Amino acid sequence: MADDVLFEFLHMEMVSHIYKDQASRGEMEKDRATCVSTLEGMGFRVGQGLIERFTKDSPSFKDDLDVMKFICKDFWINVFRKQIDNLRTNHQGTYVLQDNKFALLTQFSNGKQYLEEAPKYLAYSCGLVRGALSNLGMDCVVTAEVSLMPSCKFQVVIQKI
Amino acid sequence: MEHTQSRDACWHSRHHSKMAVCIAVIAKENYPLYIRSVPVQNELKFHYTVHTSLDVVEEKISAVGKAMADQRELYLGLLYPTEDYKVYGYVTNSKVKFVIVVDSSNTSLRDNEIRSMFRKLHNSFTDVMCNPFYNPGDTIQSKAFDSMVSAMMVQAS
């Protein structure tokens, strides 16, 4: 089905466009951080809208863990067509979501090649998760790490006010 | 032809059976994103009614947290009846609240009709959230949302 890859292609172009845009204005180091936050910001707004649509018909969530399970299953399936493979938590507001075959990284490599480029392609998805959780009332910081593609881990730290 | 804003119960229930007198959308931080009421002169009174209903909503939400799994509905039902009005509530998973106020004399409006009004509100609200020109937290200015709400409200003459 061609529609599966449409978003992947769009995402690749988005990242490439944001970086090209910044590169044409010089000053490499500062721009890299701006690019990542631009991508993260885009993901954030989309995550807010998506979660509104996905939770329209579901009953209210019992607690934070319930919300994280929803993100790992229904949300991930709707966006990346598979579930999160492993969810770990310290039961104190930190969650690690492991995806062994992350949809946006499968085209890159099966190991360490292009590893240094991977973070650019994870920024949007971090924003997506942050936006989704923010709209459900959970303010958090989402970061991602990759050591062996296409597997990656998203770390969600709930901010306690 | 003149339509007087008569408070005659019979006239209301015959011509406005499926209609609300006030509809509000409240953000999770408890400020109004959207509030429409009919007639417009009573707007302040409705703002007050909706504001006080938020306490009841908070109470119901925290009660649901301790209740059984299958009772975690989004529809909260009748929040409280006043002398002139009945106030109904609904909370989305994103903690946005919808409040519908109907005339007390309107006895023909059934529970499942109120539920379907809330469903319509929820569906339209989701569309607003997904509109790239809408910034979450801003007041709702969508014309599509406006006309969906107008269709549910008592007609002002």
Image (cartoon, coloured by chain):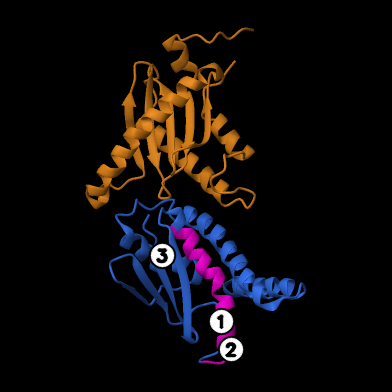
Which corner quadrant of the image does residue A141 belong to? bottom left
Can residue A137 be seen in this snapshot?
yes
Evaluate if marks 2 and 3 touch, with contact meaning CB atoms under 8 Å apart.
no
Q: Residue A88 carries which label?
A: none
Q: How many labels does the image show?
A: 3
Q: Are marks 1 and 2 on the same chain?
A: yes
Q: Which chain carries label 1?
A: A
Q: Is residue A118 above or below residue B113?
A: below
Q: Name the residue under label 3.
A: A71
Q: In this view, does B31 lie above or below A11?
A: above
The residue shown at (50%, 59%) is A131
Q: Mark 1 points at which residue?
A: A118
Rendered location of residue A21, percent (x, y): 74, 71
For the record, the magenta segment spans A112-133
Question: As shown in the figure, which amino acid type bears the numbered disc 1?
Answer: Ala
A127 in magenta: yes
Q: Which one is earlier in the sequence, the residue at label 1 or at label 3?
A: 3
The residue shown at (54%, 61%) is A44
Q: Chain B drawn in what color?
A: orange
Question: As shown in the figure, which amino acid type bears the numbered disc 3?
Answer: Ile
Q: Mark 2 points at which residue?
A: A114
Q: How crowded is mark 3: few (under 14 residues within 10 Å), some or many (20 or more)?
A: many
Say which of marks 2 and 3 sits in front.
2
Does dot 1 land on a helix, a strand or a loop? helix
Q: Mark 2 lies on which chain?
A: A
Rendered location of residue B41, percent (x, y): 54, 16
Spatial separation of the CA atoms under disc 1 and disc 2: 7 Å
Q: Which chain is blue?
A: A
